[in-house]
Amino acid sequence: MQREWKNIDYLLNIGEKQKKTYDIITDIGILEILEKYNPILVGTIPIDIDIDKSDIDIACEVYDFNKFKKIVIELFHKYKNFTIDIRNEREREFIVANFYIEEMEIEIYGEALPVEKQNGYRHMIIEDRILKIGGRKLKEEIIKLKKAGLKTEPAFAKCLDVYGDPYEELLKLENKDDNYLRKLIL
């Protein structure tokens, strides 16, 4: 059954870092503040493959970057090490803000796409499916590779023996059925 990713209550049933993430997000009301931008917590924390340095990633649907930038600066500039930047990578323009609360980095990411179509969200969904199929052994191997310095998508690509750009290759697995994914894992 697919998790309802917009309701972060699931964080309370995973681990200590997820509980701390829940507390930080709810204490500052970040999802409510950014509500009109369809914010969704994405990344490694929701799927429980985070490591000590993993950040809290919040993806948003943003079409007016300058307006969003002003709002984010106004609301979050007071937090430690605040930065905000409009960037263009991999043929995508996006805005990203970073800051720290209680020694945890928060990254707010905005792109001119519905969050469910953004690569960060899509990666999380396929990674979650793969982890459910692969079980504890795969999860432990992914975390081990991440602790050794690999980013999440390259860690999955290594475990699945997938070659090429790991970010693109994972997206190609979105529409594959569980049997196909199971064969990659074994």
Image (cartoon, grey):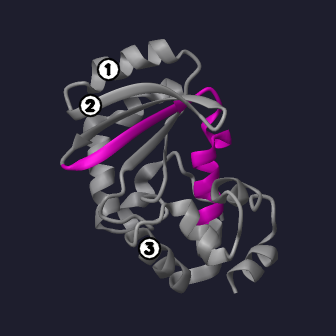
In percent of the image, x 35 and y 60: which residue is there? 18
Question: Which residues lie in the magenta part?
Answer: 103-128
Query: Is 75 included in the stretch rendered in magenta?
Result: no
- Mark nearer the N terminus (3 vs 1): 1
In percent of the image, x 39 and y 68: which residue is there? 14
**How far across and down, in percent of the image, does residue 135 sit?**
57, 82
- Reply above or below: 123 against 143: above
- Total numbered labels placed on residues in the image: 3
Q: Which residue is mark 3?
A: 143
Q: Which residue is mark 2?
A: 82
Amino acid type, callout 2: Phe
Neighbour class for label 3 at 10 Å: few (<14), some, many (≥20)? Answer: many
Neighbour class for label 2 at 10 Å: few (<14), some, many (≥20)? Answer: some
- Mark nearer the N terminus (1 vs 2): 1
**How far across and down, in percent of the image, does residue 101 sit?**
22, 43
The disc placed on residue 73 is 1
Amino acid type, callout 1: Ile
- Mark nearer the N terminus (3 vs 2): 2
Callout 1–callout 2 Cβ contact below 8 Å: yes
- Work out how far the residue at label 3 is from the one at label 1, CA to CA, in angstroms: 33 Å
Helix, strand or loop at label 3? It is helix
Task: Name the side, left or right, on which 55 lies relative to 36.
Answer: left
Amino acid type, callout 3: Ile
Task: Name the side, left or right, on which 181 lies relative to 41.
Answer: right
- Work out how far the residue at label 3 is from the one at label 2, CA to CA, in angstroms: 28 Å
**How far across and down, in percent of the image, does residue 67 sit?**
46, 12
Helix, strand or loop at label 2? It is strand
